[in-house]
Structure formats: C-alpha cells, structure tokens
Image (cartoon, rainbow, N blue to C red):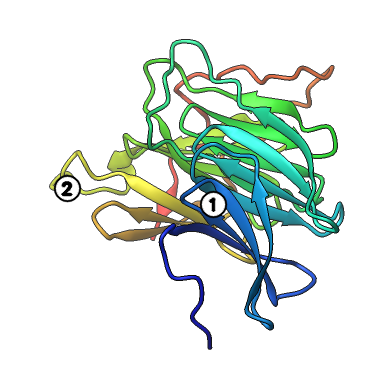
Amino acid sequence: MATFMPPPPAATFLAFHPQDNNIIAIGMDDSTIQIYNVRVDEVKSKLKGHSKRITGLAFSHVLNVLVSSGADSQLCVWNTDGWEKQKARFLQVPSGRTPTAQSDTRVQFHQDQIHFLVVHETQLAIYETTKLECVKQWVPRESSAPITHATFSCDSQLVYASFLDATVCVFSAANLRLRCRINPTAYLPSSVSSSVHPLVIAAHPSEPNEFALGLSDGGVHVFEPLESENKWGVPPPVENGSASSAATPSVGAPGSEQAQR
C-alpha cells in the first residue's frame, strides 16, 4: 500500500493509534519516536525522551496516552493529544544483575487499559499508568536464566514468560505469582541443541489458556493445558495487604505436567 521513511535510522518498533489507523507511532534506532500520518505521508511529531533505541510502544485508548520503552531501561508516558511527555521513569534493575547492551524493554497494556506489563530480562512488572508506579514485580533468582519475552493472555488474567534456558513460566497477572513451570524437556526433544531458546511468546486471541512459543531455531510450538486440568497450575491464595513486590516463587510449582501440541 505504501512505502515510507527509508532508513537510516532504522525503525525498531511500530504501534498503530487505536482510534485512527492512519497514525502510526514509529520507534527509531536513534531513540526518537516519530508520529507518522500515512494518509498525508508526513511526520506530525518527533518525540525525544529516550537515550537509546526504542524497543516497545503501547497505546491506551482509555487514558489517551502512548507508553514507550527503550534499551535505556526507561519508560515514558506521552499524551496523544499534543504528544507532550507526561512522565518518565527508569526501571529498578535488581542488585546483582547487569542487563546486557542488547537488553530490550517491552510494554503491553492490560485489558483495563490502565495498567501495563513491563518485560525486561531482569524482571516482570505491572505498572499503573497515571502515576507511572510499579505495583507488582517478579524477579528471577540470581542463578536463573534471563527472561526473553512475556505477554498477557487474551483475557489479561495470566502472564506467559519465556527464559533463555528454554523454561516457560505461567503467572497470575493479578499478583505475578507463579502458577506453573514448563521445563524444556516437556517440549524439546533431547536431540535439540541446548542453545535453542524461546525468542517470543504470543497469546491466542480468544483462548486464554493457549499460547505459542517461537524458538531461535525457527521452530514454533503451541501449548495448551491437559484436558483433565483445563488450566495452568493452581491459582494462588488471595493476598492480604498491598505489597509492591511479589516474592520469588520456588522452582517447583503445581501443575507442571502440561500438554503441548
């Protein structure tokens, strides 16, 4: 339909405006975000606030904001009316973990369009947008492999996360408590090289318990729970209080015997 904005700098992330698909937010390798109007073939705004390439963009049509994330481990909130920056905050990287130069930060809005998921190799976190405050955080043990990707289930009740050692974990989205852990031996044949790892997770658009895993060797696996269980693991007990950080669960988790097709 159209070709526009040839590099350099390269476009590193795209997000369509939820109320006008002629408007695209384009994250760039030079750390800027360009608000491009396809219909008139023109960059309407150029947003500057990050110091490294843009690695994530997400719109909230309820709050009329754009949330951006970058390789600088920074989150920014932009008003979509005038494209002014409202808030900015750096991720709190856990002590003992040094993110790599290539470490991406991804963002994805919850179904409520007020909270959003932040995915970084050192943590999963849920942020409240208006105050840009972290309300829940899950941090892997120091000895654990880095997180490679994560996503909400289609109903935003679960978070699926993949790790560099090919482990996959399923969390309750409300409190980031671990519900079950899927070991690599459950879906990777023993003949596959140990260097194969997940690069991306995608949630099924209408089946909350189904997700797909894209691997570094080009393979794609689709997962669903056993028919007898019909869900991933066991929901954790309701929390009392409002702790800002969920404790790191133990390696063993209920419901670890799951089906994969």
Res 119 → quadrant: top right
Q: Residue at x 54, y 41 (%)?
A: 70
At 33% from the left and 40% from the top, the residue drawn is 166
Label 2: how many Cα within 10 Å (few below 14, some 14–19, many 20+): few
* Callout 1 amino acid: Ser
In the rendered image, the residue lying farthest to the bottom is 1
Q: Which residue is mark 1?
A: 228
Q: Residue 242 is drawn in which quadrant?
A: top right
The total of numbered circles placed on residues is: 2
Image coordinates of residue 61 in percent, x first then y, are: 82, 59
Q: Quadrant of residue 8?
A: bottom left
Asked if residue 236 is positioned above or below residue 44 in the image, the reply reads above
- Taking the image as shown, residue 245 lies to the left or right of residue 261, namely right
Image height of 37 relative to 234, above or below: below
- Mark 1 vs mark 2: give the one in front: 2
Whether residue 220 appears in this view of the structure is yes
- Residue 228 coordinates in the image, percent (x, y): 54, 52
Q: Residue at x 51, y 76 (%)?
A: 4
Residue 7 location, x and y as percent? 41, 64
Task: Please give left or right for residue 8 compared with residue 175 in the image.
Answer: left
* Residue receiving disc 2: 192
Give amino acid for label 2.
Val
Depth check: give the residue in front, 26 or 177: 26
Across and down, in percent, residue 42 comes to: 65, 74
